[in-house]
Image: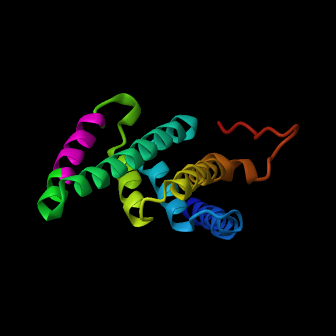
Amino acid sequence: MPLVLFTAIVIGFVSALWAGLAPLVGLSVWAGFAGFTAYFATGKHGVGALGLTWATNLVGVLFGAAISGSGAALGGLLGSAVAVWVGVTLVVLVGSLRWFSSIPGIFVGIYTYFAIDGDWRLLVPSLVLGAVFGFLSDLSSGERALAALRPRRGGRGRRPRVR
């Protein structure tokens, strides 16, 4: 089976699991998919990518709350514009720090905060578990996973040497 087909099937299956399970436990399917996407946007793999996703998504939720609150406090369109300006400036600065180095992950936290009308109690677990599903997709797809499913040739489970 071609690698891209295998990867597509696995990620599609894990996505279907998330879409089916999230509503059963009261989570947002689409916020979870945002966390799933943020995992892959790190450009990394494994536990390190998962930790980076969690850190950036959660700091993004905090930025979203800060931008929303300061924009409301300042009032009007100008107040909102100033809040966005200051908030995005700080996002870029924070993104230069190692543990927050995935700026797209920070923006995922911000935009999902606004998209879900500030309901952080729903948003945070949806982002966190969505990232876990991204991690699971990453672990269960790709060349290593496909190789593990291929039948072994030769004696005791080892492939014969090619010379």
Residue under the image location 66 percent in, 51 percent down: 140
Q: Residue 148: horizontal and vertical position, in percent?
A: 73, 47
Question: Residue 113: image x %, image y %?
Answer: 41, 57
The residue at 42%/65% (across/down) is 117
In the image, is residue 93 part of the stretch drawn in magenta? Answer: yes
Depth check: give the residue in front, 39 or 143: 39
At 39% from the left and 54% from the top, the residue drawn is: 108
In the rendered image, which quarter is residue 28 located in?
bottom right
Q: Quadrant of the N terminus?
A: bottom right
Quadrant location, the C terminus: top right
**Residue 66 vs residue 150, the one in the foreground:** 66
Q: Residue furthest right?
A: 156
In the image, taking residue 72 as reference, residue 76 lies left or right, namely left
| Res 58 → quadrant | top left
Front residue of this view, candidates 57 and 10: 57
Residue 61 placed where, x, y %?
41, 49
- Write the start and end of the magenta stretch as one range: 83-94
Observer-nearest of 146 and 136: 136
The reply to whether residue 82 is in sight is yes
Residue positioned most to the left:
78
Residue 19 lies within the magenta run: no
Of all residues shown, which one is farthest toward the top?
98
Image check: 7 left or right of 62?
right
